[in-house]
Image (cartoon, coloured by chain):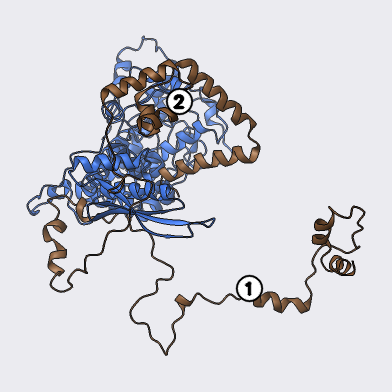
């Protein structure tokens, strides 16, 4: 099956038309020659040969490269990313396929395509943009569903940080590194398809499924404006970060030195997008159940200490408000034990009681510090309530003959 | 005099410090002030380091103390992932099961022990919070504070009306000039701090933030 981009057909229909941007026109011509194929290998080869013969070849490209990377390099070096057919002969790609224990149904060509970032190849038929978008949606769905059901009382800010800690670019970058994905120094058609390809001198392309650009986005950085949680829910992306569609200034292919924050961000996003694209391809080829267990095994199985995400401003007041809202008795701090009061390093253990029930306790070097810590621990105990480890999530109902759904606990909201 | 001389010879540094007020022309004996550890002193020091364990850690076979368990290391803070019974929602199976009632027949609850004491500086039953000020009092506080913020300082007003400093600060602001003069005075005081005190203050603020983030 050969799919050709519609814009290139339009260009062919108007041969006299002058392209507005010569760079772009060249890309489109390239896309006419390549074909994204996973099934008919013979037809693909034939098309490749005839097209290459017909197209005018730049003599500079035909001159021998040193060292000769690949027998195909003379032809394939003309493309921004490796041809799909070369994925079959890549040892790295086969090793990655085996290491991730992917199903036979995920072809190597798709896996190779998942490693081509959109900064390396702008053609959406040959880069991983659509697979990464699919994987991004799937990961975020499963992570947020898990957190919602497992920790129903998490405040929204903590929820955002927790989702980012599981599914954010930094976490997925680590996942990609642990999978053994390596990056090519410079992307190109002649490099091994088993290497991740991205262009560090370009702005990263982050898949955005949710949120929109704020009208005041330019001033947020400049004046350090506060973003309230309500506006973050409405305008910002899945991780509560500002959606900034303004592209970074690209310096036209000249390589930036490695190790700047910008190149690091591009690399991190490219690694994360590769993970997302691999998960998207698992979904596309193996289905819902397979991708769910894959995400369970690789994303949700990572350890996250939720209690370390909290930062309070006035914990005692917040706890008093919580007790008033829930109609508990007023919280009272009581001294449980102490040692070395007159020494240089005293320790006080203070418990917070509501009536006769202890809500939490904390130890500190002064009575006030211990009381603050006890109030913080009480609040964390409230916010980190969990119905249990084996609680069912809504997507468990999608399997056949699933038992009847019991409604999950929905909390009335955080303490304001 | 002879006794003083022997004392000087034995403990030269201390004696010099002590007696420098009385005798001004003192010549210290020519000895190295650094202590040299000899073979003869090693045993003594080793013995001094061998601290016997605290009696509460000792168990003698003759007197088996089966009544209590020694926790060594002592118990740590309770885990925040353990939700107190009061915080469980009504729909939670743990609340529905009411485990204390189930186990009451097997292990009856201990006798009612009095609750631990409350913190001394907080309002409690012995020192209840009183809300005795009326809106008229508040407007009076505001008037006085606006009139003469120097005489009617926060402390003076709190003493006069029998309330806390915080309440006065919640009720009223000082005039702008007074605030600025106060800030300038504080800045002058801060400028006089040496590096040690400045660092101590900075560390204190940093410790507070770390405490609120749960890092210490």
Per the model, the C-alpha gap separating discs 2 and 1 is: 57 Å
| Residue that mark 1 sits on | B49
Q: Is residue A134 left or right of residue B159?
A: left
Above/below status of B162 relative to A219:
below
Q: Residues within 10 Å of mark 2 (few under 14, many from 20)?
A: some
Chain corresponding to blue in the figure:
A
Q: Position of residue A155 (x, y in %)?
A: 28, 39
Whether residue A46 sits left or right of residue B188 in the image: it is: left
* Left or right of residue A260: residue A203: left
In front of the other: label 2 or label 1?
Answer: 2
Q: Position of residue B194 (x, y in %)?
A: 65, 36
Give the mark nearer the N terminus: 2 vs 1: 1
Relative side of A397 to A331, left or right: left
Pointer 2: what residue?
B153
Q: Secondary structure at mark 1?
A: helix
Chain bearing tag 2 is B
Q: Nearer the viewer, residue A100 or A314?
A: A314
């Amino acid at each position: 099956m050969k799919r050709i981009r519609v814009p290139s057909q339009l260009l062919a229909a108007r041969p006299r038309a002058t392209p507005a941007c010569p760079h772009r026109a060249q890309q489109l011509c390239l896309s006419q020659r390549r074909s994204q194929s996973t099934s008919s290998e013979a037809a693909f080869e034939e098309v490749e040969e005839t097209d290459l013969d017909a197209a005018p070849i730049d003599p500079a490209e035909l001159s021998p490269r040193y060292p000769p990377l690949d027998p195909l390099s003379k032809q394939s070096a003309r493309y921004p990313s490796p041809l799909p057919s070369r994925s079959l002969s890549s040892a790295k790609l086969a090793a990655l396929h085996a290491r991730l224990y992917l199903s036979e149904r995920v072809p190597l060509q798709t896996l190779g395509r998942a490693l081509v970032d959109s900064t390396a190849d702008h053609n959406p038929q040959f880069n991983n943009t659509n697979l990464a978008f699919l994987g991004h949606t799937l990961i975020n769905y499963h992570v947020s569903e898990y957190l919602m059901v497992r920790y129903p009382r998490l405040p929204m800010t903590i929820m955002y940080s927790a989702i980012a800690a599981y599914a954010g670019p930094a976490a997925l970058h680590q996942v990609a590194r642990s999978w053994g994905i390596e990056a090519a120094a410079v992307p190109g058609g002649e490099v091994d398809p088993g290497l991740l390809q991205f262009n560090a001198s370009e702005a990263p392309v982050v898949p955005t499924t949710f949120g929109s650009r704020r009208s005041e986005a330019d001033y947020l950085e400049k004046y350090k404006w506060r973003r309230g949680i309500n506006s973050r829910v409405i305008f910002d992306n899945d991780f509560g970060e500002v959606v900034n569609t303004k592209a970074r200034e690209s310096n036209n292919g000249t390589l930036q030195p490695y190790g700047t924050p910008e190149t690091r961000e591009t690399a991190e996003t490219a690694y994360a997008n590769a993970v997302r694209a691999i998960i998207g391809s698992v979904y596309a080829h193996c289905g819902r159940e397979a991708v769910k267990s894959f995400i369970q095994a690789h994303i949700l199985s990572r350890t996250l200490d939720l209690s370390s995400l909290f930062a309070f401003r006035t914990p005692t007041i917040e706890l008093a408000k919580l007790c008033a809202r829930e109609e508990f008795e007023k919280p009272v701090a009581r001294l449980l034990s102490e040692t070395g009061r007159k020494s240089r390093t005293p320790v006080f253990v203070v418990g917070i009681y509501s009536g006769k029930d202890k809500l939490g306790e904390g130890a500190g070097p002064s009575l006030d510090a211990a009381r603050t810590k006890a109030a913080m621990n009480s609040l964390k105990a409230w916010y980190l309530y969990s119905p249990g480890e084996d609680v069912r999530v809504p997507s468990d109902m999608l399997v056949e003959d699933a038992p009847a759904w019991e409604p999950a606990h929905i909390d009335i909201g955080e303490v304001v | 005099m002879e006794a003083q001389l022997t004392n000087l010879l034995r403990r030269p540094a201390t004696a010099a410090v002590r007696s420098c007020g009385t005798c001004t022309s003192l010549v210290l004996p020519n000895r190295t002030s650094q202590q040299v550890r000899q073979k003869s002193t090693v045993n003594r020091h080793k013995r001094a380091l061998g601290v016997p364990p605290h009696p509460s850690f000792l168990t003698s076979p003759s007197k088996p103390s089966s009544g209590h368990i020694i926790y060594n290391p002592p118990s740590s803070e309770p885990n925040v992932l353990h939700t107190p019974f009061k915080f469980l929602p009504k729909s939670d199976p743990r609340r529905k099961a009411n485990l204390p009632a189930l186990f009451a027949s097997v292990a009856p609850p201990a006798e009612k022990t009095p609750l631990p004491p409350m913190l001394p500086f907080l309002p409690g039953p012995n020192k209840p919070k009183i809300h005795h000020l009326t809106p008229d009092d508040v407007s009076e506080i505001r008037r006085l504070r606006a009139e003469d913020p120097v005489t009617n300082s926060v402390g003076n007003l709190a003493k006069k009306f029998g309330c806390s400093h915080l309440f006065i600060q919640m009720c009223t602001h000082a005039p702008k000039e007074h605030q600025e003069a106060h800030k300038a005075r504080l800045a002058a005081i801060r400028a006089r701090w040496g590096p040690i005190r400045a660092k101590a203050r900075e560390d204190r603020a940093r410790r507070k933030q770390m405490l609120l983030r749960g890092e210490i």
